[in-house]
Image (spheres, coloured by chain):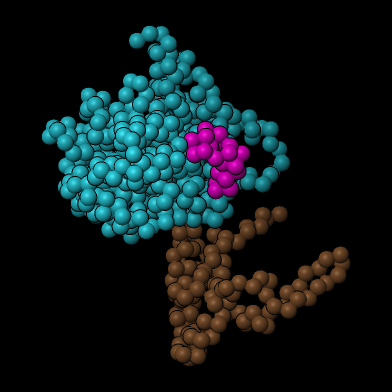
Chain colours: A cyan, B brown
Amino acid sequence: MNQADRAKEARAAAETAARRGYGKLVALLAARTRDLAAAEDALAEAFASALAQWPKTGVPRQPEAWLLTAARRKAIDAARRRKSAAEGEPHLQLIAEELEAAAEHPAEIPDRRLALMFACAHPAIEAALRAPLILQCVLGFDGSTIASAFLVAPAAMRQRLVRAKAKIREAGIPFRIPDRADLPERLAAVLDAIYAAFAEGWSDPAGADVKRRDLAGEAIWLGRLVVELLGEEAEALGLLSLMLHAEARRTARRNDAGEFVPLADQDMRRWDLGMVEEADALLHRARARNQIARYQLEAAVQSAHAIRRTSGSSDWPAIVALYDALLGLTGSPVVAVNRAVALAEAEGAAAGLAALDAIGEDKRIVEYQPYWAARAALLGRLGDRERADNAYALAIGLEADPALRRFLEQRRAALGGI
Amino acid sequence: MKYILLIYVDEAKGAQMAKEVGPTQMSAPYLAYTEALKKAGAYLGGDRLQPTNVATSVKTANGKTQVLNGPYAETREQLGGYYMIEAEDLDAALAWAARCPAASYGTVEVRPIWAMQAS
């Protein structure tokens, strides 16, 4: 490893440690007041110093103690400057007290990050904002970084985050792990938010955009945190398994020339097999709970693909059955398209095309690139070159990723003249 | 925290239901609900409102008072009553809102009361 790589690694380790400590302290300081903005304010300078200093000095032995000391110094300064009682003063007083108490026993700070995540993914918070809110409060990402990952204007994203935090405070959204009766539904919202963050990171297959690539890694870390703090919840295990299965194939999605490689043609030597094994073990643990739901089924699909590393091919009949179950659960046309593709592998192109025809009525599918790409491929296999060519044209027109577009163009050209 | 539960129901539908089952049958579940709120120490107040056809709205502009016949806004569901409750947090308030009889045939909006700073 050269010096530049070592420096990069030190920077990454420092940033990770700073984010972990920051989230834990935000969760602690906001738990009683529900005032996330005030908790973030109290820690902002300490967090910025950590991000600036730790890459040079190394991560301190007790990162949270370091952050607390730095934050306390700032809180004391601020208290000196503030003479008159201003609005929100009781919150700031309470936060200052929490800081003092935590600083006395930094090793015993309770981990309330899970409760914080439940507040961020509360049904009273707009669904599209739950993932951004978690990324900001639990991991300390700034509004601009989050905005670029979710393709939203930075000013708009910052404003929406401020409003969401105000709602948590003013509406009295609790920082609490929900009761057993509410847990499945509320946990699903937390898991959906984590998966949304993962999906944003995953959609940058070339890994060109560092911010997006990091997002997938951070989402996996959040998934691990939920499993660690919540124990054997089947869907939490299922989501982590699903993300690890996908992440294990990240680099295999492109060849050395940067071209798109479909799953069936991927070089298995580029899969992270350790990660695949971990994903399968998690799925196994989830199954023991006997509460099958969406993320476990999706992880099981990935697992049935990954079986190719030992058997030489994906387990298509199993994949069709899993998609049947998913379709029954979600009624999603996206699932229906995937099911049709699997059916074509298990029972032949004609069966797959018939299944696609059956979905064609759904209006949501008209602008869905994979539907047209799947149609084109199956029509091509059945020798209907003209209709295949038309379907490829639509698929190419709907695709935003240049590498994927090139791949579809090659497939279209391979149909031969019409 | 203090919350107000604003009860929005379709007045026409409500009147129809009252005709079918009788006014006593309509109010019985509300009496039971109010009793439950009181037993739990959550009840701060509440009333049923007269329908919007007897509503009058007022606003002043340039020192002149405008009196308008009818409710503030014409909507599909109308404000028909309210409960003022004390609840630990939003989840507790939402749980009370879900038990409100109107939640099954209308909408119950939950709003925190603006806490006035003691001066």
| Rendered location of residue A129, percent (x, y) | 50, 46
Q: Closest to the observer: A37 or A299?
A: A299
- Taking the view exactly as shown, the residue that stands out farthest to the right is B63
Chief secondary structure of the magenta portion: helix
The answer to whether A2 is drawn above or below residue A20 in the figure is: above
Q: Quadrant of residue A372?
A: top left
| Rendered location of residue A185, percent (x, y) | 36, 56
| Magenta-colored stretch includes residue A152 | yes
| Rendered location of residue B60, percent (x, y) | 81, 68
Q: Closest to the observer: A247 or B108?
A: A247
Magenta stretch bounds: A143-165
Give me the residue at 63% from left, 29% from top.
A77
Q: Quadrant of the N terminus of chain A?
A: top left
Residue A368 in sight in this render: yes
The answer to whether B18 is drawn above or below residue A185 in the figure is: below
The answer to whether A332 is drawn above or below residue A391 in the figure is: below
Give me the residue at 38% from left, 54% from top.
A186
| Rendered location of residue A60, percent (x, y) | 42, 21
Residue A195 in sight in this render: no
Q: Quadrant of residue A222?
A: top left
Q: Closest to the observer: A182 or A83?
A: A182
| Magenta-colored stretch includes residue A326 | no
Q: Is residue B12 left or right of residue B20?
A: right
Give me the residue at 50% from left, 23% from top.
A51
Give me the residue at 17% from left, 48% from top.
A347
